[in-house]
Amino acid sequence: MITDHLTNRVYFSSLLPEKCPILNAHITEALQKRGIPFFYLSGTKDIWCRDYMPIQIEKDRFVFYKYTPDYLQDKRGLLLQTNIQDVLEDKVNQLHSLRGKDFSIDLVIDGGNVVKCGDKIVMTEKVLVENKDKSSWVVPWLLDGAFESQIIFLPWDKKEKYGHSDGIIHYIGKGKVLLTNYEDFSPYYYRRFRKALEKHFEVIPLSYNVKRKHQRSWAYINFLQIDSLVLVPQLGMPEDEQALEQISKSLPDCEVVGIPALEAVRRGGALNCISWNIKV
């Protein structure tokens, strides 16, 4: 399984410099400074390329899926729904040279709801809701076959319409996951997440010692890791330094850098959401 620490190249939507110019400037500067190759994807309809780009399992194996999420089925949403073939067929992207043993799965999936954790994958049960046309046992069976990994389902907190697992956890290797500070906002779901995860991983929860818990503090878990570089969202809040400290402690062999990410967070996502990192 190609997890974040094995990746060595990252892609962003070509819309990112226009939609999030400050974030784009900081993130590209950090990558250039460390010699990490990055590219822009043409043919995208929004900046959230994590959600629609194929999922890399092995160096030459990508899993493709149907990107038709329910939250993009109204008139405005359909205009923002990227057709992955438009992205892959654009010669500027040069993605044809990366593709090998492609595997297509007949399921509606968001890439943001797929967190690769060694030999396991964590998803919320939103994927079951998105595929109601299939029997309850068929969806896990198809996922197992596509990813060749054990699928661990977390309950879906329906107050979060996207149902993305990358806003809940981040795999840090050696059987460990970081868990966002969900306890500050929903102790009920926090307990359910921990119960499901602790059967398989050592769970390290993030927490923030501040008087008032900010609703945007979820974004810290949505950091981007390429190889040993970790880029953590910074929001101009007291929690910023605490998030950097905790993530640095959890990833002692990595260089952890803060990136101003408020432009993306205000739109509903953070650094993992805007990126597609792979191994080539």
Image (cartoon, helix red, strand yellow):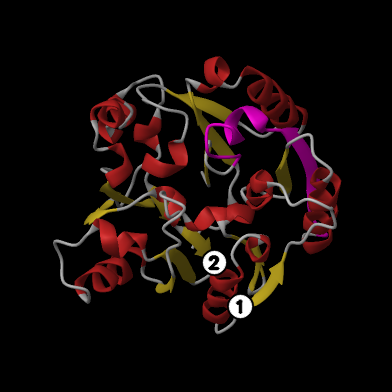
What amino acid type is highlighted by mark number 2?
Answer: Cys
What amino acid type is highlighted by mark number 1?
Answer: Phe
Picture quadrant where residue 113 is located: bottom left
Point out the frontmost of discs 1 and 2.
1
Examine the structure image and report whether residue 256 is included in the region drawn in magenta: yes
Q: Is residue 74 left or right of residue 61?
A: left
Is any atom of residue 69 visible in this view? no
Q: Which residue is mark 1?
A: 201
Q: Is residue 2 left or right of residue 156?
A: right
Picture quadrant where residue 90 is located: top left
Of residue 210 and residue 114, the one placed in the foreground of this image is 210
Is disc 1 placed on a helix, strand or loop?
A: loop
**3D distance between C-alphas at marks 1 and 2:** 9 Å
> What segment is highlighted magenta in the picture?
252-271
The correct choice, above or below, for 175 with respect to 22 in the image is below
Picture quadrant where residue 247 is located: bottom right
Q: Which residue is mark 2?
A: 117
Could you tell me which residue is drawn at 66 percent across and 66 percent down? 183
